[in-house]
Every structure is written in C-alpha cells, then in structure tokens.
Amino acid sequence: MGEHNSRARIVELIHRLLDHLLCHHEDDTKALLIILKVRIKAQRVLSSCIDVFNYFARTLVPPTLSKLQNSPDISHEEFKGALYVLLKNRMLLLIVHYWKVMVDVWPVIVQVYKWVPTA
C-alpha cells in the first residue's frame, strides 16, 4: 500500500510540474533569468521522472495534448512547452507502442505541423 501511495504522490507532483512547465511564463525581464533556471531544472526533473517511471509517460499525454490546440486560450509559451514535453523527452519513444495513446497523439502532431510557421 505504501508503494501505491508513493506512486500516487509522484503522479500528483509530476502533473503539477507539467502544469508549471506548460503555464509558467512572465513578461518581467528581471525575473526572466530565474524563470529560465527554474524551467531548465523542472525540465530535467520531468525527463528524469519519465526515464525512471516510463509507464508514467502515458498519463502525461492527455494534459500535454490539451495544450497543443489552435486556440486563443493557449499561450505561445504553453504551446511550446507542450511540444517540448512531447517531443524533447523520451516520452514519444515510450508511448509509441501503446496504440490507444498514439491514436490521439499522431493526429495532433500532424495538425501542429500545419500551424507552425516555416521560416
């Protein structure tokens, strides 16, 4: 029972971390360096957690995909954060064999490709 509680707590903390990564943005230039340091550390922790608890990657997909919508309610920073979480970690490699998850992921990735401007 203790192991289940520990996993539930880790799940809760990682979801909070994911929300922080996807939503945390500031316009205050004084705080930019601090925010960047926190974001880098948070990204490293998230990557480490995905590596250690690779089954957990599947639970991160729904909140990540919800930020990859072409909507005025989603900021550019949230959108970029969601792309980072989905594509810059081992997460995609860990979920690629779970068809129930991938059936939701691939259409969003294709749709995102249409939205991202090419330079």
Image (cartoon, rainbow, N blue to C red):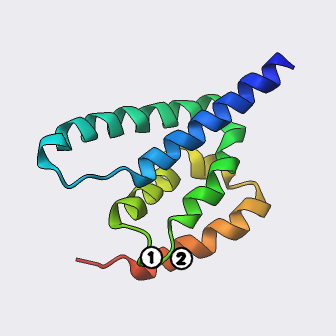
Quadrant the C terminus occupies: bottom left
Horizontal arrangement in the rendering, residue 37 relative to residue 2 (left or right): left
Q: Local crowd at mark 2 within 10 Å, few (<14), some, or many (≥20)?
A: few
Mark 1 surroundings within 10 Å by alpha-carbon count, few (fewer than 14), some (14 through 19), many (20 or more): few
Q: Which residue is mark 2?
A: 110
Q: Is residue 9 above or below residue 86?
A: above
Residue under the image location 52 percent in, 55 percent down: 86
The residue that appears at 47% across and 31% down in the rendered structure is: 45
- In the figure, residue 90 lies in which quadrant? top right
| Horizontal relation, residue 77 to residue 45: left or right | left
Residue 28 x %, y %: 16, 50
Marks 1/2: CA distance?
5 Å
**Residue position marked by numbered label 1 in the rendering:** 113
Residue reaching furthest to the top: 2
Residue 71's x, y, as percent?
Answer: 46, 78
User: Which disc number belongs to residue 86?
Assistant: none
How far from the left and from the top, in percent, is residue 25? 31, 52
Which residue sits at x=34%, y=66%? 76
